[in-house]
Image (cartoon, rainbow, N blue to C red):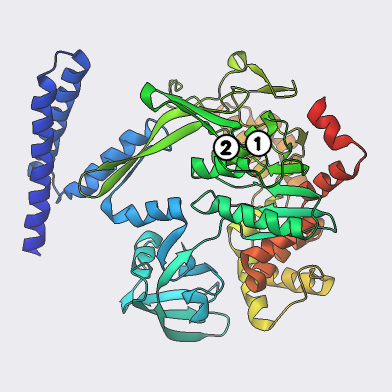
Amino acid sequence: MKKFKLFSDFRSYIFIGTILLFSFVFISFDDNDDFELAKNLDIYQTLIRELRLYYVDEIHSDKIIKTSIDKMLASLDPYTVYYPESKIEDFKFMTTGKYGGVGALIRKDTAGIIIEEVYQNYPAYNAGIRPGDIIKSVEGVPVNSANTSSISDLLKGVPNTEVHVKIYRPYTKELKDISIKRQQIRVKNVPYYGMINSETGYIKLTDFTQMAYEEVKHALISLKEQNANYLIFDLRGNPGGLLNEAVDIVSLFVEKGTPVVSMKGKMTRWNQSLSTKKAPVDKDIPIIVLINRNSASASEIVSGALQDLDRAVILGERSFGKGLVQTTRDLSYNTKLKITTAKYYIPSGRCIQALDYSHRNPDGSVGHVPDSLISEFKTKNGRTVYDGGGILPDVVNKQEYMNPLAQFLTKNFVIFDYANRYYFEHDSIESIDNFKISETEYNKFINFVSSRNIKYQSNTDKSLQQLIKTAKSEKYYDKISNEINKLQEELKHDVHDDLEYFKEDIKRILAYEIIKRYYFRSGLYEYDSKHSSDVKLALKVFKENGKYNKILNK
């Protein structure tokens, strides 16, 4: 232990020495900002030294310095991030979609570390681990008080090495010791594609890691071989990823050499414009791109470029609005910095960044770009589009918020638990096309929920409680108490009644969760492609005489 501590101290002295060295370098310059930087670095190393010497408890230099770096970068924007050596594998997974591990997602709740999802035909699944299993130990070490990050690190490792876990399965009361051989896990960018009807193809793209272009290209060619004359390209919930993959995906649908995106930042020598470099697969197939408020970054480059080029109709909700470009810089000791270096501009010339991180509000919060600064731009056909707030769909289909009971049942994993129990009671289910939650099954679910003695609050309930609190503090409560009591009575929840009132929404969510147990993510997206209101509206746009072309030429 002492050798470890001495090594840790030695690294800290190297760090402090490095700060001092940079201080001398910066002081040699005349620029005032360089002097301020050197001065503050000197203050920082002095502060660290005083903390190490005099703070009442032992100071772990690595931990507090990492915290200070994270807080500093967070004050700039959420996308400028420091990756210590211990998190380099996480960084690689973000860019490649690959990592060495067992192929399972975990979470922590009151029961412990829970298996939330397993990837089909990967080690955890092949070893018999299933969603809902509780991890009791890893390599003989109990994990009850551990966090998910540390357990995830233990499960990851070099392919072909083994990891030993003990799991408890609450649905069968089994305790199992399982050895899992790690392998390279690669999460697909296109988890599902298929024909919705005899002439309409569908592609779901969830990420823009390496191979995204190749996967979309393969899916598109396969659909064309199945006589797809129309395409629904689903980017809902896609957070983005690699810029070059986005440009290449646009190239599937437009002439080679078509401008897609340009980047402008402080380092003018890095400013560049990117055009398609690959030959298209189909320049004419009508496309509807689905987006929502969680479609961001590379998703917005693809949907925005296709909109600006009048190559596709965009349908759904306004996208997230991330128009910032990140570049990775190598740092010392095998660490990395992902840093925002530019803003990107799509073919019409607009930037769709929604939040202005450079001009924060007095309380530190970040505001949206004001309406007064939003500008008009023109698409290739002369249609009007706007900057400053994500991609606004050509056909808006705003999704209804999940009802409060469904939110509660999802957030508290009640639906998750029921789906797990259902899985262990049923060897199989009907095909995705035919599966639905029967009335008999829903009544079983109602009984399951009743056994959990659930109490929940809606946002309306919470707002009313805040009103009561404010009214009491301002001495108005006595004056309005009768009205508040009546309102409370009207809003009183009966879980059984709400389960009936919100039945159709809850049945749909329950079906999603059960299908995922048997058909995994690909089945989930296949089911959604046949039941989503966005998809149904897209099919209607294709079907209605001339509507698709009218949108692109109005």
For residue 13, side relative to residue 398 (left or right): left
Q: Which residue is mark 2?
A: 276
| Label 1 residue SS | loop
User: Residue 227 falls in which quadrant of the image?
Assistant: bottom right
| Label 2 residue SS | loop
**Foreground residue among 178 and 68:** 178
x and y, in percent, of residue 166 in the image: 40, 80
**What residue is drawn where x is 33% and y is 69%?**
158
- Mark seen at residue 255: 1
- Up-down: is 437 above or below 267? below
* Residue 65 visible in the displayed image: yes
- Up-down: is 18 above or below 226? above
**Foreground residue among 91 and 487:** 91
- Mark seen at residue 236: none
- State how far apart marks 2 and 1 are (Cα): 8 Å
x and y, in percent, of residue 219 in the image: 66, 57
- Up-down: is 507 above or below 258? below
